[in-house]
């Protein structure tokens, strides 16, 4: 069979002419067949289109990098046999595959009159994933760099303000964490606690007493045990026991009922009678006791309230600063140095007045401060003695508050006049002080100085170099100074170091710190050893005893946990131990006394006489003998008991 178009001989079962590509019809056709453009899709089977433009995996044979099937140019392309397909072949093949290709990829429009395959939808380019990832990575790097080098990018005044605010917040937060941890343990154990303290005398103390012809060989130890329990917020009981050589010699049972303003006490070794103390009858002395619930009331001033108040006024102060400079400087303490940003704010007369005015105005408008002052007044203002002690001049809160605010208003008015004066006289920029803050690269406070023209200064330095740190805290009033300085290491929250206390450049005290656990301290648990000894320039005294005592060192060893706090104080010198003091608090069950129905009033002279007649020292004498107290001490009590107390 020959091709109807070019006459080329066509082998059997061939669908297209091998020369010109004209489709071969089953039925005889005329020599010049007419191609029906509009019916091409209907007449040509889909399978034929697949055979021509797709391989057996249904993948396009011709594909651009961008994903289209055909080149956008109209220039002919080589087919599989190397011949360029004719225009008719291209048009007919396009028509045959229009539907199938449209399902998979968009077609290009070659002319408006004929349907052609749409070009394929462009696949998401992986380059965009790389670009997006790079943008995110760069953003993360910028954020990390900024966080780690925040001081380099921050305005000096903002940096100083943020450092002071952050330090203030951290200080309150650390205290609150410690306080809350201990209160939670106490509350969990029923608000009851037991304290045991004992003193064991060693050879050094006995030798000291021998110098004064005092024989204390019989005295090995003394002890005190305090069992305390708060039944309610206004009821506190305590049992106190004191003894010698492990024997309880005397005790005091105590109960304070705050709401009733009553205190009850009994000393079983002296009398079976109870003593009652009516606080309202004590006059001036009542001020010491009538507000035993003050701690409970003061707790209404929460740590969070105080933190918020402190931060507010730190911001008010720093907002008034001007001309804050920033420079890098080395901060060195006791051989430990580090480079920090030094922020310096010069305080001139104008700035000083503005700070006072701003703080005063904030106080006048501060409703939170007024609420805290109300709690303060309720705690201490109800008793004349405490009110005078704590600066409360009136028994009415509103009257007292108004008096306080009037004094603040007067201060603000005076400072406004001062501000006008220094401007008129041209001395507004005259320096009166300087505030210096050292911060590390992330903006944390590492040092602070407050200097005035009269040479008084307060400063704190804390440079860090890896695990090493230096510390110096000092105050100078223009005449004398007081300084604590030293250095150490802080590795994995364990601090070791040596520090010196100086007054007027004299080393008066040395402090050695070993194995102090700062992580445990944040939870209110003390672990570590602190050794305190006289400094090189300490005055040793003029007599043998004071000289010996001045040469001693005191080692405080803390070994606490969630359930108990332990502290051992070892008093010694280089060669001899003088005494050991052991103190431990725990949360054992405590049974305190109840309010007695019958008691003798301490303020009643007749009741006092009755109490003396009720005394019997027999039990006390027996316990002293049991403890090994020499007869020369016990015999005196026996004489009093026999001739003065017995009826």
Image (spheres, grey):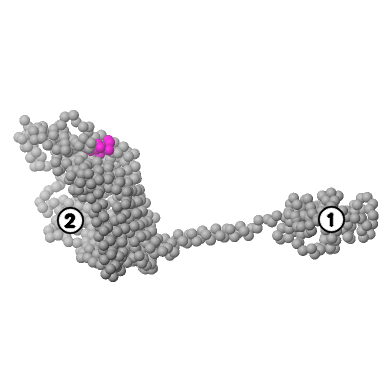
The segment highlighted magenta reads 228-238
Percent of width and height locating residue 622: 14, 35
Query: How many angstroms separate mark 1 from mark 2 (CA)?
Result: 117 Å
Quadrant position of the N terminus in the picture: bottom right
Classify 274 as above or below 27: above
Q: Tell me the number on the disc at residue 367.
A: none
Percent of width and height locating residue 389: 19, 49
Is residue 230 highlighted in magenta?
yes
What residue is disc 1 on? 92
Q: Secondary structure at mark 2?
A: helix
Q: Is residue 167 left or right of residue 268?
A: right
Question: From this viewpoint, which residue is outermost toward the left?
Answer: 643
Is residue 320 highlighted in magenta?
no
Q: Closer to the camera, 500 or 346?
A: 346
Taking the spot 77% from the left edge, 54% from the top edge, the residue there is 117
Taking the spot 69% from the left edge, 56% from the top edge, the residue there is 122
Q: Main secondary structure of the magenta part?
A: strand
Q: Closer to the camera, 555 or 135?
A: 135
User: Mark 1 vs mark 2: which is more N-terminal?
Assistant: 1
Classify 85 as above or below 375: below
Q: Closer to the camera, 506 or 127?
A: 127
How crowded pointer 1 is (Cα within 10 Å; few <14, some 14-19, many 20+) is rated as many
Tally of numbered tags:
2
Q: Is residue 509 left or right of residue 468?
A: left
What residue is disc 2 on? 549
Q: Nearer the viewer, mark 1 or mark 2?
A: 1
Q: Is residue 48 left or right of residue 371?
A: right
Question: From this viewpoint, which residue is outermost toward the bottom?
Answer: 426
């Amino acid at each position: 069979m020959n091709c109807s178009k070019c006459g080329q001989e066509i082998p059997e079962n061939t669908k297209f002419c091998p020369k010109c590509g004209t489709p071969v019809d089953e039925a005889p056709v005329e020599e010049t067949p007419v191609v029906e453009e509009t019916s091409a899709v209907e007449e040509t089977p889909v399978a034929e289109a697949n055979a021509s433009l797709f391989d057996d995996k249904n993948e396009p044979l011709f594909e651009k990098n961008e994903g289209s099937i055909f080149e956008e140019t109209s220039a002919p392309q080589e087919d599989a046999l190397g011949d360029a397909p004719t225009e008719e072949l291209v048009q007919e093949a396009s028509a045959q595959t229009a539907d199938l290709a449209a399902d998979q990829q968009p077609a290009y429009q070659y002319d408006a009159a004929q349907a052609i395959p749409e070009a394929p939808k462009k696949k998401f380019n992986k380059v965009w994933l790389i670009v997006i990832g790079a943008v995110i990575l760069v953003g993360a790097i910028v954020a990390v760099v900024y966080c780690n080098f925040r001081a380099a990018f921050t305005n000096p005044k903002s940096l100083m303000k943020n450092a002071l605010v952050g330090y203030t917040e951290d200080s309150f937060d650390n205290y609150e964490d410690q306080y809350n941890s201990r209160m939670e343990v106490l509350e969990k154990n029923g608000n009851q606690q037991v304290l045991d303290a004992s003193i064991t005398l060693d050879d050094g103390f006995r030798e000291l007493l021998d110098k004064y012809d005092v024989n204390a060989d019989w005295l090995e130890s003394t002890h005190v045990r305090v069992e305390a329990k708060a039944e309610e917020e206004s009821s506190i009981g305590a049992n106190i026991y004191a003894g010698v050589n492990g024997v309880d010699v005397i005790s005091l049972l105590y109960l304070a009922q705050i709401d009733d303003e009553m205190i009850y006490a009994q000393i079983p070794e002296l009398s079976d009678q109870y003593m009652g103390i009516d606080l309202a009858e004590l006059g001036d002395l009542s001020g010491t006791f009538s507000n035993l619930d003050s701690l409970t009331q003061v707790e209404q001033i929460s740590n969070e309230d105080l933190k918020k108040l402190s931060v507010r006024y730190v911001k008010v102060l720093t907002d008034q600063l001007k001309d804050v400079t920033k420079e890098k400087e080395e901060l060195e303490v006791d051989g430990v140095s580090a480079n920090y940003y030094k922020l310096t704010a010069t305080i001139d007369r104008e700035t000083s007045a503005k700070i006072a005015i701003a703080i005063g105005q904030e106080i006048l408008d501060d409703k939170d401060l007024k609420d805290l002052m109300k709690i303060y007044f309720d705690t201490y203002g109800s008793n004349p003695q405490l009110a005078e002690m704590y600066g409360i001049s009136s028994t009415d809160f509103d009257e007292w508050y108004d008096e306080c605010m009037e004094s603040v208003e007067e201060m603000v008015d005076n400072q406004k006049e001062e501000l006008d004066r220094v401007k008129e006289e041209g001395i507004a920029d005259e320096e009166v002080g300087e505030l210096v803050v050292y911060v590390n690269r992330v903006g944390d406070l590492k040092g602070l100085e407050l200097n005035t023209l009269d040479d008084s200064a307060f400063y704190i330095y804390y440079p860090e170099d890896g695990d090493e740190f230096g510390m110096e805290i000092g105050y100078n009033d223009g005449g004398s100074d007081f300084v604590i300085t030293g250095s150490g290491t802080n590795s994995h929250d364990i601090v070791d170091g040596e520090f010196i206390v100086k007054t007027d450049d004299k080393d008066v005290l040395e402090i050695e710190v070993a194995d102090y656990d700062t992580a445990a301290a944040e939870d209110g648990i003390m672990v570590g050893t602190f050794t305190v000894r006289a400094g090189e320039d300490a005055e040793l005294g003029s007599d043998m005893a004071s000289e010996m005592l001045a040469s001693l060192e005191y080692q405080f060893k803390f070994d606490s946990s969630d359930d108990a706090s332990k502290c051992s104080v070892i008093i010694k010198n280089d060669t001899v131990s003088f005494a050991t003091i052991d103190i431990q608090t725990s949360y054992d069950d405590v049974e305190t006394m109840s309010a007695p129905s019958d008691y003798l009033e301490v303020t009643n002279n007749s009741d006092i006489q009755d109490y003396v007649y009720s005394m019997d020292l027999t039990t006390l004498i027996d316990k002293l003998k049991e403890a090994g107290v020499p007869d020369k001490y016990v015999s005196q009590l026996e004489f009093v008991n026999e001739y003065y107390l017995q009826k």
